[in-house]
Image (spheres, grey):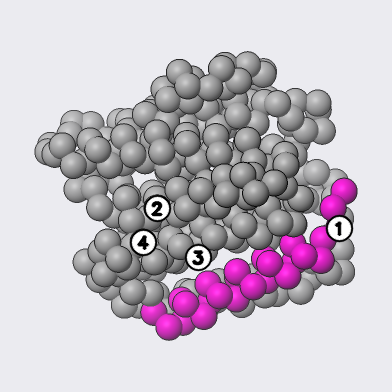
Amino acid sequence: MTRARLLLLAAATLFSTGGAAIKGASLTSWQVASFRSGVAAVALLMLLPSARRGWSWRVWPVGAAYAATLVLFVVATRLTTAANAIFLQSTGPLYLLLLGPLLLHERIRRRDLAFIAGVACGMALIFLGSDTTAATAPNPPLGNRIGALCGVSWAFTLAGLRWLGKHGEGNSALSSVVAGNLIAFVAALPMAVPVARATWFDALVLLYLGVFQIVLAYLCMTVAIRHVPAFEASTLLLLEPSLNPIWTWLAQGECPTPQAIAGSAMILLATLIHTARTPVP
C-alpha cells in the first residue's frame, strides 16, 4: 500500500510538471502539442505491451476526445497562466455531470448541485482575474476560453472511458491513450511544420514531456490505482493541479492573479468535498 501511494504521488508530480515544461520550450504551441504526442505514442507502444492490446472501433472516438484535450491544454498553457490552464481542465467533472444524463443516462444527484455551484464560482473568479498579461501568459482571456474548452473535451474523454467500461472494454483505456496521442500528433502536425528553429533543449523538453510526463506518469498511475481506495487515489492525484503552478513559478517566475488563486482553490476544494461525499460503487 505504501509503494502504491508513493507511485500515485510520483504520477501526480510528473503530470504536474507539464505546465513548466510546455512554457519552457521555444517551439510553437502546435509543435509542442504534435511532437509531444508523437513521442508519447511511440514510447507507449514500445514500452507497454498492454498498449498494443484491446483495440476496437470504440477506442478511436474516445481517443479523439483525449487528443482534443492534449492539444487544447498545450495551447491554453502557452496563452494563459499554468494555474488557469490546469484548473480549467480540472473542471471536466462538472461538464461530465451535466452531460451524464444525455451520454451515460446517469442522473444528477442533489449532492452534485453544490459541486456544480462551487466549480462554476471558481471558474468565474479565474475569468475575472484574466486581464493581466505577462511574458509567459500573452493572452489570458483567449487562453482561459481554450482552457474551458479543454475541460469540456476532458469530460468527453471521461465519459468515453466510462462508455468503454459499460461495453466490457475497460482494458481499452490505455489503447485510447495511445490513439489520442496518435490523433493529436497527426492533427497538429500540419500547423507544426516547417520547424523554423529548434534547439537541443527543445528536443530534451519534448522527450521529457512524451516519455516521462505522459508515459511514465501513466505507468505509475495504472500500477498503483488498483491497490489504493478510490477516494484516497483521487485525493493523492489532486497533487497535480496543486504543484503545476508552483513548478511554473519556480521555472519561469509566473504568478497567477489573486482572483485566479482564489478560483483555483475553490475548484480544488469543491472537487475534494464532492469526491469525499461520493460513495464508492
* Mark 3 vs mark 4, CA separation in Å: 10 Å
Q: Do tag 3 and tag 1 residues touch (Cβ < 8 Å)?
A: no
Residue under numbered circle 1: 279
- Is label 2 in a helix, a strand or a loop? loop
Amino acid type indicated by mark 2: Thr
Q: Report x, y in % for residue 100.
A: 78, 51
Residue under numbered circle 4: 247
Question: Is residue 104 within the magenta segment?
Answer: no
Mark 2 is surrounded, within 10 Å at the Cα level, by few (under 14), some (14 to 19) or many (20 or more) other residues, namely many
* Mark 3 vs mark 1, CA separation in Å: 24 Å
- The relative height of residue 278 versus residue 206 in the rendered view (above or below) is below
Image quadrant in which you'd find residue 129 = bottom left
- The relative height of residue 104 versus residue 95 in the rendered view (above or below) is above
> Could you tell me which residue is drawn at 68 percent across and 52 percent down?
233
Image quadrant in which you'd find residue 107 = bottom right
- The relative height of residue 166 versus residue 84 in the rendered view (above or below) is above
- The region drawn magenta spans 257-281
| Of the image marks 1 and 4, the number of the one nearer the N terminus | 4
